[in-house]
Amino acid sequence: DVLVNNVGVMLHNYQQNSAGEDKQFAVNLLNQYALTESLSANASLADDAVVITVASGGMYMAPLVTAALASDDATAHDGTQAYAIQKRAQVVLTEHWQSQPDNTNTFYVMHPGWVDTAGVKQSLPTFRKLLAPVLRNATQGADTIVWLAAKRPVPSSNTIWLDRKARSVHAYGFTRARSDSADKLLGFLKKFL
């Protein structure tokens, strides 16, 4: 089995889903957590399943700050910052899943590079225009996902996969000094289930 958690959205205007939750948080992190946890708890994944979470290079710009993952206040919502923190949380969550002693599945987190998606076009038009010459197409962005699913390299901690190589999850020192732990992140996510 291969599960690819590949959904994301950056909303500059605060929105709530039908459950009254921060819609961006629910899409980027909560539903991936709920789906993966549910499949694992119900033994719905084969023992040798692979779970690949698609993060973003945006996570290089944020440490894990659990209190900033979801908002319930439109005036406090910063879609770009929340996106980066939510993507950082995906990295921490993947490391947690991989580190569980009774785990029989393999967990990876990857960054597809800068891909020219509809989301980039809508949410980051200036970024898209400036980086147009180096933006990847969908096939290029999916390459490492397909490679991880097929090759299943040995996972290592503190890495994110990009272009079929394990890279550091930190580009800057300030993201190493996270104020929150994986346990705090898990506690926060469990409150929504």
Image: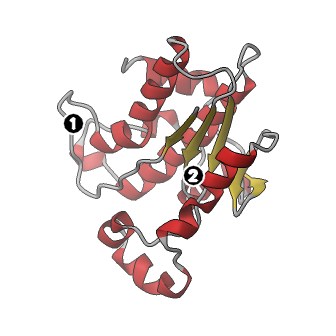
Q: Is residue 25 left or right of residue 53?
A: left
Q: Which mark is in front, 2 or 1? A: 1
Q: Is residue 14 above or below residue 134?
A: above
**Residue 67 image position (x, y, % from top left):** 45, 34
- The residue lying at 38 percent from left, 80 percent from top is 126
The reply to whether the C-beta atoms of the residues labelled 2 and 1 are less than 8 Å apart is: no
Gap in angstroms between the C-alphas marked 2 and 1:
25 Å
Name the residue tied to disc 1. 17
Q: Is residue 178 left or right of residue 138?
A: right
Amino acid, disc 2: Ala
Q: Is residue 21 above or below residue 57?
A: above
- The residue lying at 65 percent from left, 45 percent from top is 149
- The residue lying at 67 percent from left, 20 percent from top is 47
Q: Earlier in the sequence, mark 2 or mark 1?
A: 1
Nearest the eye: 40 or 25? 40
Q: Quadrant of the N terminus?
A: top right
Q: Is residue 134 left or right of residue 132?
A: right
